[in-house]
Image (tube, grey):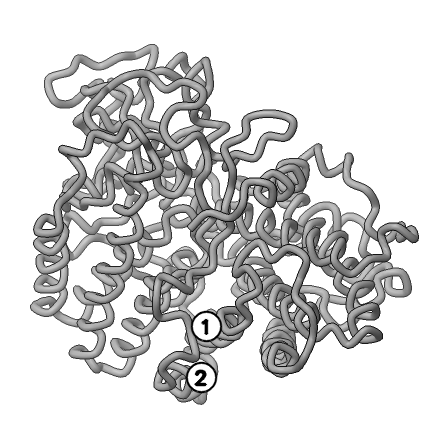
Amino acid sequence: MKKPMLLAIIAIFSLVSCENSDLELLEDPNDITLDKADLNRFTNQIQLDFASFMRQMGSNAAEASRVEYMTGRNYNNAFQPAILDGEWLLAYQNMFSDISAAQKIAEEKEENKHLGVMKILKAYTLITLVDHFGDVPFSQIADLGEYTSPIADPGTEVYEGAIALLDESIDHLNATGTNLENDFYYNNDFNKWKKLANTIKMQAYLTTRLVDGSALGKFATIANSPGSFISSSADDFVFQYGSNDSNPDTRHPEYSRNYTSNGVIGYRSNWLMHTMLQNDDPRRRFYFYRQVDCTPGTDGCPPNTLRLPCSVVPVPPHFSAGMIFCSVGEGYWGRDHGNSEGLPQDGLQKTAAGVYPYAGRFDGDEFAAVSEGIGGGGAGILPIMLASYTDLMRAEFSLAQNNTGAATNALRSALQKSTEKVVGFASVDPEANTALIPSASTINNFITRVVNEFSSADANGKWEILGNQTLIANYGSGNLGYNFYRRTGFPFRGINPTHALQFNIETNPGSFIRSFLYPSVEANVNSNITQKPNVSVQVFWDNNPPSPSFPAAN
């Protein structure tokens, strides 16, 4: 699972400097000097910028869909344009500029492997940009020096261009060429890169199934070709972090925020912790680490107005019966969707990110405060495309065609692969309490219970369960779950109370984020791009009813 430490150190040194104000410290990628005009230097940086881009985009998506905590009770204000500047710059100023320059070198030297990898990363970046922002620059980004104010192309055309890049990438990877100096993902196993390209195409076809009558057929062509896509966890597309804490800090950024001398920075999602607790999900001890054994306002613990102010506040009147609010219980201490309270002194009480995928601590009922260096030391992963995700896509594909038998089998396979991968992270924490690592029978019982519930549910119930499992399995990523939620509207009000997706705590939070506002770094300077009026603007593949009526769990 782990890459050599030297590569991880190189990788994170680049990644941690790419966010927010630190973007100002980056070298201008358009300032190409002779020593930078080296193909491997370009491909190294492109890979690293891609990982940072996908992590940040996935975090935004996870917050919107309740997998992570979202602050801001008004959806239109939750992600202000300036907040998204870093992601946009990583794509356009960094990656696309570097790819344009590197492609010329690679074509001249006939370095097909480099071309193949770069085109895959460019295609996936473009697809992700469309999924989050809608229409984005594409046709004029090959030469950003000439087109300083590129037009925003229709999302449909960007998707078509991205799929064409994926097809080209496979041709390149089948051709001769030397290895990459550093392949941070697949160690120059180009068969795995080809599987990734096909899997991204599957994602694109499934995403567009509501607006393209041929999309499911195209999806099936790949899905019915064994060995052509990511179907084994051995082919998972992940980025590996290191455990070095300084000069440079190679740890997963979420570890760095959760394991400090002052405790945890940020909050985990109450909805996700509650859902996994109620369903006795064996992955929860890996996802979350509890510092305390009792949550104020529940389990007999008195409310705490200083550290958990909402523990003395009544449940919002618009919350449905049984919907989690404020206090999850059993020491799980997070925040509700849309909670915009201040920051009390709760850093040594609230729940931390766990051993999966952040290489924090496995929750073995220690109920001890976090500190720097404990657990896996931050040597976690960024899950980008996993075999379990592919199975969840196959389950949606089958359910959309009313093939419930195939959907059931795909869901079972997804749960098996997801739990196996997560539980495998027990070895990342050398001090993990092995007595509490779920056994094979515990895992099998959980999977059987979910699958049986899925089999016996009606049509809406099946979508509800699949939606829940898609969101849960996407922990640490978020993009596919956010797409699923906008595409299907599930999960929503909880046909089964344990599946209820928590509402925003604001009674009238405005329309759900159907697409994010354009980043200020582009909207404020590009005369060819007009800022959206609000976040209710739908991307091209989302033909569902407009917000606020959809999605229902607003």
Q: Are marks 1 and 2 in contact (CB under 8 Å)?
A: no
Q: Give the number of the disc on residue 186.
A: none
Q: Earlier in the sequence, mark 1 or mark 2?
A: 1
Q: Nearer the viewer, residue 103 or 468?
A: 103
Q: Residue at x 35, y 61 (%)?
A: 233
Which residue matches tag 2?
A: 215
Number of marks drawn: 2
Residues under labels 1 and 2: Cα distance? 14 Å
Q: Nearer the viewer, residue 49 or 87?
A: 49
Dividing the picture into quarters, in which one does residue 91 lie?
A: bottom right
Q: Can the viewer see residue 220 in this picture?
A: yes
Using the image, determine if residue 505 lies above or below residue 138.
Answer: above
Q: Is residue 300 left or right of residue 530?
A: left
Which residue matches tag 1?
A: 199
- Name the amino acid type tagged 1: Thr
Q: Is residue 141 left or right of residue 31?
A: left
Crowd band around label 1 with a 10 angstrom C-alpha radius: few (<14), some (14–19), many (20+): many
Spot occupied by residue 192 in the image (x, y as percentages of width and height):
49, 69
Q: Residue at x 72, y 65 (%)?
A: 137
**Label 1's element?**
helix
Q: Can the viewer see residue 511 in this picture?
A: no
Q: Residue at x 27, y 26 (%)?
A: 290
- Name the amino acid type tagged 2: Ala
**Label 2's element?**
helix
Q: Is residue 267 left or right of residue 105?
A: left
Q: Is residue 547 left or right of residue 312?
A: right
